[in-house]
Amino acid sequence: MISDFIKGVSAYFKAFSLISEMRLWKYLLVPGLISLLLGGSMAAAAWGLSDNLGMWLQSWYPWEWGAGIIASVAGWIGLALMAIFGLIIYKHIILVVVSPFMSPLSQKVEERLTGIHTPNKGFQTSKAIKDIIRGLRVALRNITRELFFVSILFIFGLIPVLGWISSILIFLVQAYYAGFGNIDYTLERHYSVKGSNQFVKNNRWFAIGNGTVFLLILMTGIGFLFAPPLATVAATLEASKRLDNNPINSNSKGQADYV
């Protein structure tokens, strides 16, 4: 558990040097700008909507006594809710939108690791559409589960004694599904969606480690510019090592039972 988490985190340090060594900076520009624009837009929307949500929550309090305190608490709850759910929505949208860029990036890294190269056919519209459709399937599955777990944990977090535990668990759930999306850029070449689900489940702490750094980078603000490509390279570096030894892998491509 701890070992897998550390490997998921430490892969980011290797990713920096590999991006420079392989001159992969061109893969960072367009996805980075898309991520920054989407992240900025959603942050602004979340900030604006948090006031409305806070006022709606406050309206449920019928008494004048303590109304000021309730208004303040409702405001903070509204902001927290919008921040949490805004990050969830952003995370899954960006993983789908930049998939036509992240999949080739992941493939180049894997080719470097394995020494097996495929012919470069350039940008293909059909391939980009296929990547987006798969990304949507993964995102829709993951976002419903993530929203369910986070909602339950947030409700428990309103209990004072359980608040800090709930916050940690919410972060870990978000990290898991963020890592899932980053790892899937590698898995899509080896497994169907069902196979990818099982792979990540078997390597959940690696996914959490990858997603933890991804979320922390986003929290810097400027991290929206390079978090998706960096996380993709880091995920590919570690996921590629686990493909052949994975228990669900029945042949060299790992597709026999999951296509």
Image: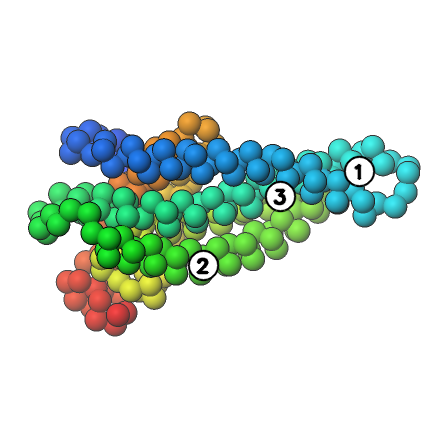
Q: Hey, which quadrant is residue 160 in on the image?
A: top right
Please rate how many residues cluster around mark 3, counting C-alpha atoms within 10 Å: few if below 14, some from 14 to 19, many from 20: some
Residue lying furthest front in this view?
Answer: 125
* Residue 110 circle label: none
Mark 1 = which residue? 70
Q: Is residue 167 above or below residue 145?
A: above
Depth check: give the residue in front, 127 or 207.
Answer: 127
Mark 3 = which residue? 81
Q: Disc 2 residue type?
A: Leu
Residue, x 27% and y 69% (percent of image)?
258
| Total numbered labels | 3
Give the secondary structure at mark 2.
Answer: helix
Q: Mark 1 or mark 3, which is nearer the start of the sequence?
A: 1
Q: Mark 3 or mark 2, which is nearer the start of the sequence?
A: 3
Give residue 251's position: percent from left, percent from top: 16, 66
- Say whether marks 1 and 2 touch (CB < 8 Å): no
Measured Cα–Cα span from mark 1 to mark 2: 35 Å
Q: Disc 3 residue type?
A: Leu
Q: Disc 1 residue type?
A: Ile
- Say whether marks 3 and 1 touch (CB < 8 Å): no
Measured Cα–Cα span from mark 2 to mark 3: 20 Å
Give the secondary structure at mark 1.
Answer: helix
Measured Cα–Cα span from mark 3 to mark 1: 16 Å
- The label nearer to you, 2 versus 3, is 2
Mark 2 = which residue? 140
Give the secondary structure at mark 3.
Answer: helix
